[in-house]
Image: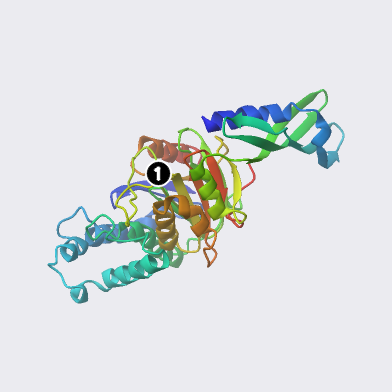
Amino acid sequence: MAATVEHVMGMPILVDVRDDVDLLVLEPLWAWFRWVDATFSTYKDDSEISRLGRGELELGAADPAVQYVLARCETLRRETRGYFDVQAAGLLDPSGYVKGWAVDRGVALLEAAGLRNFAVNAGGDIWLAGGALPDFDWRVGIEHPHLPDSVAAVVQVRDGAVATSGAYARGDHVLDPHTGEAPADLVSVTVTGPDLGVADAYATAAFAMGARGPGWTAHLRGRYEALTILADGRVLSTAGFPRAAL
Amino acid sequence: MRRKMSIVLSVAALALPAANAAAALSTTNASKKVVTKKLAGATEQANRWGTVQVTVTVRLTTTGQKTTHKYEDVSGSYSYHTDRSQFIMSQSLPILREEFLQGQSPQVQMVSGATYTSEAFAQSLQSALSKL
């Protein structure tokens, strides 16, 4: 049982392993994240995403992983009525899907190495595998918008994803692609489900929808559930959202 | 502002006579008694826009002369509010569950949030690590 943090892909990534293994088993995971960063970062001029954005690289000549990710993003854009959009800020930026997708693929690496009970927290978007031994489930707090030492809710998850999008202390960073402005009515949207990349994209889209976000999350399919914190202090959650008793 | 209000009302609901209380669970052994109660508060004027009613689920543990309580759930309903809020609710109900934002510090292993480069996130990480 051990936990470790690395700063990679522009954020702290925490891996908490509850199986009895040496943390050396995480080395392929860190190498994978470094490759994702080099390939997908919008902060690196020579990444494939930056070169695609500047028109210096043809999509057909890009790495198959880049082609796959951009195709998934296009599907998600249609599924979210255009609210999840890699071009939302004008430049090609699939970061909102890449982070979760990179974790999903990284989790497969850890499972192939025999790990069963662990969590990967990539800047607040989390995959939870097995249980938080000796506890049966993982308990994840949802960041409170005003109280730094508190959480707004607790979710209980085994083998699933928890992603949150919102406007906390970091300031507005999700824009409505239809207006180019930050949504005003919502504080955050948390989505749980079987895929972290998709959960993150749904959370981003629902947040960008503003007042229409909660209603949209009520109709999500495929075992995705959502909890929305409104600016007026109310909390709306879908019927199956995995709330833990306190 | 709203959060503060809901906490005050939660406490008020607890102080009410037990007219609405229902003992849901009661176990007894030699010296310890545990009762779970669901208490509905009176409908109160929340502010100039509307009213609120809070329901609190609390677990009372009596050991000898001493009784401790632990909140298990707080929910509420209100007649609400601005046009904007009405709009959100008309989009959302009755499929979504509504409650008040609360601040809690239960034991968790991870925190999910949007402030991934913030001080708050770093602190969450720190506290998560320190629990191992």
Question: Secondary structure under badge 1?
Answer: loop
Q: Out of A46 and A83, give the one closest to the viewer.
A: A83
Taking A65 as reference, is A164 left or right? right
Quarter of the figure with residue B10 = top right
Which residue lies under the disc numbered 1? A184
Q: Position of residue B8 (x, y in %)?
A: 62, 27
Q: Chain of mark 1?
A: A
Question: Looking at this view, is A235 or A224 the one in front?
Answer: A235
Kind of residue sitting beneath label 1 = Ala
Residue shown at 33% from the left, 40% from the top: A171
Relative to A62, say whether B103 is above or below.
Answer: above
Residue in view at x 61 percent, y 48 percent: A244
Q: Quadrant of the C terminus of chain A?
A: top right
Q: Left or right: where does residue B111 sit relative to residue B96?
A: left
Q: Quadrant of residue A77?
A: bottom left
Q: Residue A128, can we see it? A: no
Of A210 and A79, which appears nearest the observer?
A210
